[in-house]
Image (cartoon, helix red, strand yellow):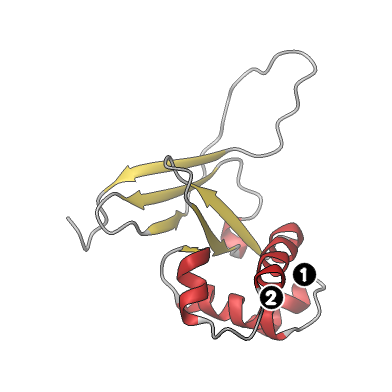
């Protein structure tokens, strides 16, 4: 999948900032924090443009965020395999801090109180990745 394919699929205009953020996320094997993306993106865009672009990409479903136990937020491209899963899970390596999307078919069977509506369930598995083990 290319940057242009992702933008087209989500009906988003092709802007420089969107293309750079998506390129960074596609090239990375792990999810990236805002600071990790900004480190490799030249200062062509101000802070507001950068954060507004992240929000636009997330709202469109092109990327998703992963919030870790220490409240660090990382972002990853939403792959076709991730969509439609009952639970979207990730693996967080406690040594290298890498965050990886897991492909699974977990089903959640929790009874919510009357009137409650579930929108999304996220799960993070903590441990050591293969490179750090």
- Mark 2–mark 1 Cα distance, whole angstroms, equals 6 Å
- Farthest residue to the top: give it: 114
Q: Quadrant of residue 48?
A: bottom right
> Along the horizontal axis of the image, is 30 left or right of 73?
left
**Residue 84 x, y percent position in the rendering:** 66, 50
Q: Is residue 115 visible?
A: yes
Q: Quadrant of the C terminus?
A: bottom left
**Residue 45 x, y percent position in the rendering:** 66, 80
For the residue pair 91 and 83, the one nearer the viewer reads as: 91
For the residue pair 103 and 17, the one nearer the viewer reads as: 17
Residue at the spot of label 2? 6
Q: Quadrant of the N terminus?
A: bottom right
**Residue 61 x, y percent position in the rendering:** 71, 60
Mark 2, Cα crowd under 10 Å, few <14 / some 14-19 / many 20+, is: many
Q: Which residue does the image show at 76% across and 73% down from the upper left?
A: 9
Residue at the spot of label 1? 10
Mark 1, Cα crowd under 10 Å, few <14 / some 14-19 / many 20+, is: few
Q: Which residue does the image show at 52% across and 78% down from the upper left?
A: 24
| Mark 2: secondary structure | helix
Q: Which residue does the image show at 60% across and 62% down from the upper left?
A: 78
Q: Is residue 1 visible?
A: no
Q: Quadrant of residue 99?
A: bottom left
Q: Mark 2 touching mark 1, by CB under 8 A? A: yes
**Residue 6 x, y percent position in the rendering:** 69, 75
Q: Which residue does the image show at 54% across and 63% down from the upper left?
A: 76
């Amino acid at each position: 999948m290319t940057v242009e394919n992702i933008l087209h699929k989500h009906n988003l205009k092709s802007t420089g900032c969107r293309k750079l953020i998506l390129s960074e996320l596609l090239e990375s094997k792990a999810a990236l924090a805002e600071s990790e993306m900004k480190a490799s993106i030249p200062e062509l865009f101000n802070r507001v443009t950068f954060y507004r672009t992240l929000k636009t990409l997330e709202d469109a479903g092109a990327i998703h965020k992963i919030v870790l136990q220490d409240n660090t937020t990382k972002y990853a491209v939403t792959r076709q395999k991730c969509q439609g899963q009952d639970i979207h899970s990730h693996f967080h390596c406690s040594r290298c801090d890498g965050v990886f999307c897991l492909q699974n078919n977990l089903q959640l069977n929790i009874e919510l109180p009357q009137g409650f509506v579930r929108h999304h369930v996220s799960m993070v598995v903590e441990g050591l990745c293969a490179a750090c083990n």
